[in-house]
Image (cartoon, grey):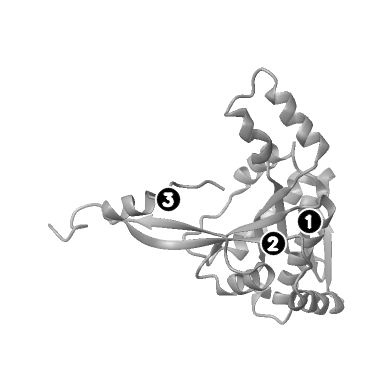
Amino acid sequence: TSHALPQSGALLEACGFAKAMDLFAYRMRRSDTPAPILRLARLAEQSGRVRVRHADMHRFEDEVAAVFDIFNDAWSDNWSFVPVDRDEARAVARQMRPIMRAHYCRIVEIDGQPAAMMVALPDLNRVIAPFRGRLLPFNWARLGLAIARDRWRTARIPLLGIRKAYRQTPLAMGVLALLVTEIGKLGERYDLEWAEFSWVLECNREMVKLAEIAAGPPVKTFRIYEKAIGPGADGAE
């Protein structure tokens, strides 16, 4: 994720901007998944209604569409949400296909229907940082080799959520906990130093609570600033 200079916040505030929302980043280490998360996940598994599967790479565009369909439903009530349409989903599918693997994406089915999902992305920054923005003459080959080897030290979870229809049911926290345990499995597969899940809105209390149980306090805070513009914005006509 991108970063701003430490003094950026103060400069924006000096220009009349104010905080609109904070978003948190959490990092789950290679250590064992916390016992409360395992208990919740076990309850979901024992319900007999829940199945976790990897993405079907032979139906990649359809799987991406299913992920964004869940995303649009799960995030629809969130602050500043903008839905992803089918054309955007197709564009994302084309862009991400070269680096995606089936196990980067987990889809949870409840009673046979896609109901929740998690998507992980490998951290390319460690590979491309020495490139200094240049792919020529040979950095393109180094990048291609890194993707082909599929060996990563860190990862990010940009998408994790469950459909609104299940949010107030007894299964909800269990399914989300089950997805958190899948992050742990991904960490074991790659021997990851950490997997970061972000951004989590500060007002999304359920996800904040789950993230803090799984990973502890946030490691980073991203702040969105806002400022009124137009006639009368500063109190003058």
Residue 83 placement (x, y as % from top left): 55, 55
> Would you call the spot at circle 1 few (<14 residues within 10 Å), some (14-19), or many (20 or more)?
many
Element class at badge 2? strand
What's the residue type where badge 1 is placed?
Gly
Is 8 left or right of 69, judged from the image as shown?
left
Which residue is drawn at the image coordinates 58% and 29% (left, top)? 132
What's the residue type where badge 2 is placed?
Met
Residue with the mark numbered 2 = 28
> Would you call the spot at circle 2 few (<14 residues within 10 Å), some (14-19), or many (20 or more)?
many
Q: Vertical placement of 33 versus 156: above or below?
A: below
Is 87 left or right of 122, judged from the image as shown?
left
Q: Earlier in the sequence, mark 2 or mark 1?
A: 2
Q: Vertical placement of 192 versus 98: above or below?
A: below
Task: Nearest to the eye among marks 2 and 3: give it.
Answer: 3
Residue with the mark numbered 1 = 187
Of 189 and 119, nearer the camera is 189
Total count of labels: 3
Callouts 2 and 3 close, C-beta under 8 Å: no
What's the residue type where badge 3 is placed?
Pro
Q: Vertical placement of 72 versus 96: above or below?
A: below
Element class at badge 3? loop
Q: Point out the residue furthest to the left here.
A: 237
Element class at badge 1? helix
Is 220 left or right of 121, judged from the image as shown?
left
Residue with the mark numbered 3 = 6
- Quarter in which the C terminus is drawn: bottom left
Q: Earlier in the sequence, mark 2 or mark 3?
A: 3
